[in-house]
Amino acid sequence: MKGRSPNLIIYHDGKRKERVDLKLFSSSNDELHKLMVDKGFVKKPDDEIARMKEKNFAKQRSDQLKRQKEKHERRRRRQQKMNQDEKKRKRNSTGLDSQNVLESENRSLKKASLSR
């Protein structure tokens, strides 16, 4: 958190076991690695770390592609909706709306039947 010194809080079986002020250590990784070993943490083998990084990268790439596909689909739907709205506006402005056509035909039929 901003304004506070960094702390490592170690839990065991869900209970807070220890708090270590990391400000006391230099920024060198060697000191922090030694601290972790002293506290009982075991470093994973390099090949396992590499596999985890690879797996994480693949998941991130998959998620990125999924987000891009969803974004593209949203754009496609929005464009489709805009096209439909434009068609409706054109139909309404030219008088080709189906309701208008039906009403116009009904009026013509009524006039024809009244004039007989």
Image (spheres, grey):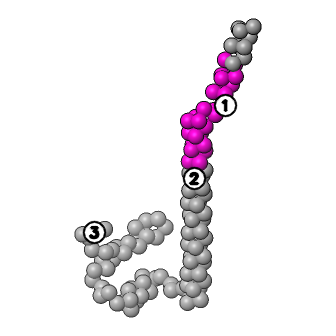
- The percent coordinates of residue 14 (x first, y second) are 47, 65
Query: Which labelled disc corresponds to residue 98?
Result: 1
Query: Which labelled disc corresponds to residue 79?
Result: 2
State how far apart marks 3 and 2 are (Cα): 44 Å
Residue 81 in view, yes or no: no
State how far apart marks 3 and 1 are (Cα): 64 Å
Query: Which element is circle 2 on?
Result: helix
Q: Is residue 105 above or below residue 60?
A: above
Query: Which residue appears at 49% of the width and 67% of the height?
Result: 13
Give the extent of the magenta segment. 82-107
Q: In this view, which residue lies farthest toward the left?
A: 3
The amino acid beneath tag 1 is Ser
Mark before the other along the chain sequence, 3 or 2: 3
Q: In this view, which residue lies farthest toward the front?
A: 116
Query: Which labelled disc corresponds to residue 2?
Result: 3
- The percent coordinates of residue 33 (x first, y second) are 41, 88
Query: Which element is circle 1 on?
Result: helix
Which quadrant of the rendered structure holds the N terminus?
bottom left
Magenta stretch mostly in which secondary structure? helix
Q: Nearer the viewer, residue 75 or 97?
A: 97
Which is closer to the viewer, label 2 or label 1?
Answer: 1
Query: Which residue appears at 60% of the width and 63% of the height?
Result: 69
Q: Nearer the viewer, residue 55 or 91?
A: 91
Count of numbered circles in the view: 3
The amino acid beneath tag 2 is Gln
Mark 1, Cα crowd under 10 Å, few <14 / some 14-19 / many 20+, is few
Which is closer to the viewer, label 3 or label 2?
Answer: 2
